[in-house]
Image (tube, rainbow, N blue to C red):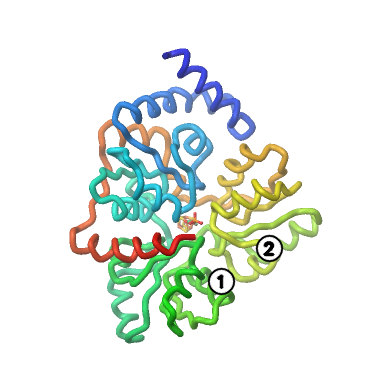
């Protein structure tokens, strides 16, 4: 048994040695071993977002994915405990999708600039200003905002969700740039909010164009949370999982993922023949999650997500409606 564990630890390191120096691995390995053992003992599942560090993504996570897939996986799991390695709204969404499970987040301070850009009160004000106009909220929002929402979406299905309503106009919140991206791809009139992602708003079209000039054979793929000039300068835009899929299927010689840069390390491990160009913007919230905090929250079952009954009942409807629409 111990040998088996050692072998699987060796296999993990073989996989990620190109992105984690040996000296760091020595710190990670004992925690990875303890977390994986504890996970089995407690019948827990670890769901990790694509922006988690390689030792989490490849070392302890059962499923690593974009926010839509994490919500769907949370609804299907048979585990007793879900440890959500990502940010707070993702853990809340998991709880909404599967309310009987214990959902833990390793750090309660793992927030999101988009989620904190708008409150339930703001949405009520918008509904008063635009009576009868349905509200589509990005999942990057609090449960309180979701409770005021008709249907949620992620970057993987935003256009599809907006068009599913069969209306001429929608309130789309809180990401101004995602709203802009949706507006370019639909005839439905979009009323947007002024939220932005502090990671993606930093990229500029000029930066992306300069990288293309230096690397004429590169494929550039951007997250739709980026400003419009970045998206126009890219070859493809899509959710984090569709970026992963693009690289896996097309195997470009060189690629730039215009998104949180840890993801490039994770995808590089799975695509050794692709060269990644990595300008680095990190999400400080995603980086709050560490192996030590995962271990502590699982061993003590702390940092449990709780949502008041009334809010949860209303918020659940908008998230379930989104998952029924799918990708
Ligand atoms: P995805 O749904 O594409 O994974 O994006 C979530 C997110 O927070 C991106 O910044
Ligand atoms: Fe929020 Fe941006 Fe971080 Fe995603 S990358 S969690 S949108 S702050």
- Give the quarter of the image for residue 82: top left
The percent position of residue 254, horizontal first and vertical second, equals 74, 48
Residue lying at the far left of the rendered structure? 309
Q: Pointer 1: what residue?
A: 181
Determine the image quadrant of residue 140.
Answer: bottom left
* Label placed on residue 246: none
Viewer-proximal residue among 75 and 7: 75
Q: Position of residue 214 (x, y in %)?
A: 80, 55
Report the residue marked by disc 2: 234
Using the numbered discs, state the Cα–Cα distance from disc 1 to disc 2 in whole angstroms. Answer: 13 Å
Q: Is residue 210 shown above or below 175? A: above
Q: Residue at x 58, y 25 (%)?
A: 22
Q: Is residue 158 above or below residue 60?
A: below
| Spot occupied by residue 299 in the image (x, y as percentages of width and height) | 29, 31
List x then y, in percent, for residue 205. Answer: 67, 66
Circle 1 Cα neighbour tier, 10 Å, few/some/many (<14 / 14–19 / ≥20): many
188 left or right of 317 in image: right
- Helix, strand or loop at mark 2: loop
Secondary structure of residue under mark 1: helix
x 60%, y 43%: residue? 267
244 or 214: which is nearer to us? 244
Query: Is disc 1's CB within 8 Å of ligand 1?
Result: no
Residue in the image at 76% along x and 58% along y: 212
Query: In the figure, 6 relative to 58: above or below?
Result: above
Relative to residue 258, is residue 165 drawn left or right?
Answer: left
How many numbered circles does the render carry? 2
């Amino acid at each position: 048994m111990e040998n088996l564990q050692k072998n699987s630890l060796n296999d993990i390191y073989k996989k990620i040695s190109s992105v984690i120096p040996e000296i760091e691995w020595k710190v990670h390995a004992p925690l990875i071993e303890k977390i994986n053992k504890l996970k089995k003992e407690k019948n827990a599942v670890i769901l990790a977002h694509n922006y988690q560090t390689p030792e989490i993504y490849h070392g302890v996570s059962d499923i690593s994915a974009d926010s839509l897939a994490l919500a769907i996986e949370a609804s299907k799991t048979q585990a007793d405990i879900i440890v959500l390695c990502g940010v707070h709204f993702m853990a809340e969404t998991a709880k909404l999708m599967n309310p009987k499970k214990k959902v833990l987040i390793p750090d309660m301070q793992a927030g999101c600039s988009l989620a904190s850009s708008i409150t339930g009160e703001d949405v009520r004000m918008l509904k008063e200003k635009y009576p009868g106009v349905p509200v589509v909220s990005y999942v990057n929002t609090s449960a309180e905002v979701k409770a005021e929402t008709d249907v949620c979406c992620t970057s993987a299905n935003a256009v599809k969700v907006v068009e599913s309503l069969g209306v001429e106009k929608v309130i789309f919140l809180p990401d101004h740039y995602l709203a802009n991206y949706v507006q370019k791809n639909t005839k439905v009139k979009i009323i947007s909010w002024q939220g932005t992602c502090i990671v993606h708003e930093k990229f500029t079209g000029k930066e992306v164009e300069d990288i293309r000039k230096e690397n004429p054979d590169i494929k550039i793929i951007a997250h739709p949370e980026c400003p419009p000039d970045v998206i126009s300068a890219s070859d493809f835009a899509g959710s984090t999982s569709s970026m992963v899929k693009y690289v896996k299927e097309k195997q470009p010689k060189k690629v730039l993922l215009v998104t949180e840069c840890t993801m490039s390390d994770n995808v590089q491990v799975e695509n050794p023949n692709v060269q990644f160009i990595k300008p680095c913007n990190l999400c400080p919230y995603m980086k709050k999650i560490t192996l030590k905090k995962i271990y502590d929250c699982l061993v003590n079952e702390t940092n449990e997500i709780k949502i008041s009954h009334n809010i949860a009942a209303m918020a659940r409807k908008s998230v379930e409606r989104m998952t029924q629409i799918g990708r």
